[in-house]
Image: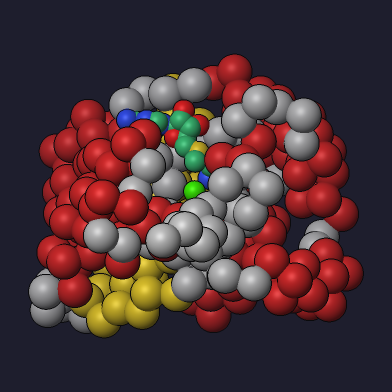
Amino acid sequence: MENTRMPVSRKNPTVLQSQELHEYILKTSVYPREPNPLKELRIATANHPMAFMGTAPDAGQLMTLLLKLVNPKKAIEIGVFTGYSLLLTALTIPDDGKITAIDINRKTYEIGLPVIKKAGVEHKIDFVESQALPILNKLLEDPEKEGSFDFAFVDADKNNYWNYHQRLMKLIKVGGILMYDNTLWGGTVAWPEEDVPEAKRKWRLCAIEFNKLVSADTNVEISQVPLGDGITICRRIC
Ligand code: SAM
Ligand code: CA
């Protein structure tokens, strides 16, 4: 039988199975309200060969709403790329807020940096070029950092999501929010393995393992949202 499933791809960057519906949502509710700096950054990224890695604008809109509800002063982001999610965070948090933004690649951050500077929010960003895990470990060496962050967005290095979660659960305060991107991995988490293209199998297993662990974590309330490539939103409750 022909496999009619539609995995997330460069053409279809969403787990929504109807491309028309996705386009309808973007055209009706997302693009008309997308702040100009984010639009500019999205366009500046569009010709990058890895442009598909940028946070989906519809997922970004939900993230903005959540940020406004939480009103964080201190945020942490793992996986910056050209900075779409970072810029939306910087635009949303108060003027004296700070984001610790970690990525192994400063060059891609620098693609978005002129837009970030033009938007007048660079002072809220502390960019760290590094693997994320040692930075989280370093932050945890300082007892004052425990429970000092209000918000975390994780969008890198999927095989470390649980390692990040364990550390972020100490860094984020009770009541704070942790968001994990790509937790539905193109919808493949629900497919039989034999239907999954070889290249997607390893990361699909990482997503499945993380979803199982985070679902069993009684220290958080969660919601897994089928927006973009799937987002898991956690609220630390103890
Ligand atoms: N949130 C970004 C946005 O809105 O455009 C997209 C992030 S992209 C999906 C993933 C990023 O994670 C890449 O820029 C990559 O360099 C970075 N990365 C990969 N492994 C990493 C690691 N171990 N630690 C920190 N960053 C990493
Ligand atoms: Ca992502």
> Which residue is outermost to the top?
107
Residue 198 lies left or right of residue 59; in this view the side is left
Residue 190, visible in the rendered structure: yes
Q: Nearer the viewer, residue 220 or 143?
A: 220
Q: Residue at x 58, y 60 (%)?
A: 14
Front in this rendered view, residue 68 or 195 = 195
Image quadrant in which the C terminus is located: bottom left
Q: Where is 107 relative to 15, above or below?
A: above
Indicate whether 219 appears above or below 154: below
**One can see residue 78 in this view:** no
Q: Position of residue 138 (x, y in %)?
A: 21, 33
Q: Where is residue 30 drawn, in percent x and y?
A: 77, 70
In the picture provided, is 101 more to the left or to the right than 10?
left
Q: Position of residue 23 (x, y in %)?
A: 77, 67
Which residue is at the front of the view, 171 or 12? 12
Which quarter of the image is occupied by the N terminus? bottom left
Residue under the image location 54 percent in, 21 percent down: 106
Residue 132 place in picture, x, y as percent: 31, 34
Q: How many marks?
A: 0
Q: State the residue in front, 175 or 165.
A: 165
Query: Residue drawn at (19%, 73%), measured in percent from left and top?
Result: 215
Please say if 153 is above or below 226: above
In the picture, measured across the screen, residue 73 lies left or right of residue 45, that is left
Q: Name the residue rendered at 77%, 29% in the picture.
A: 47
Q: Is residue 37 above or below residue 27?
A: above
The color scheme shown is secondary structure
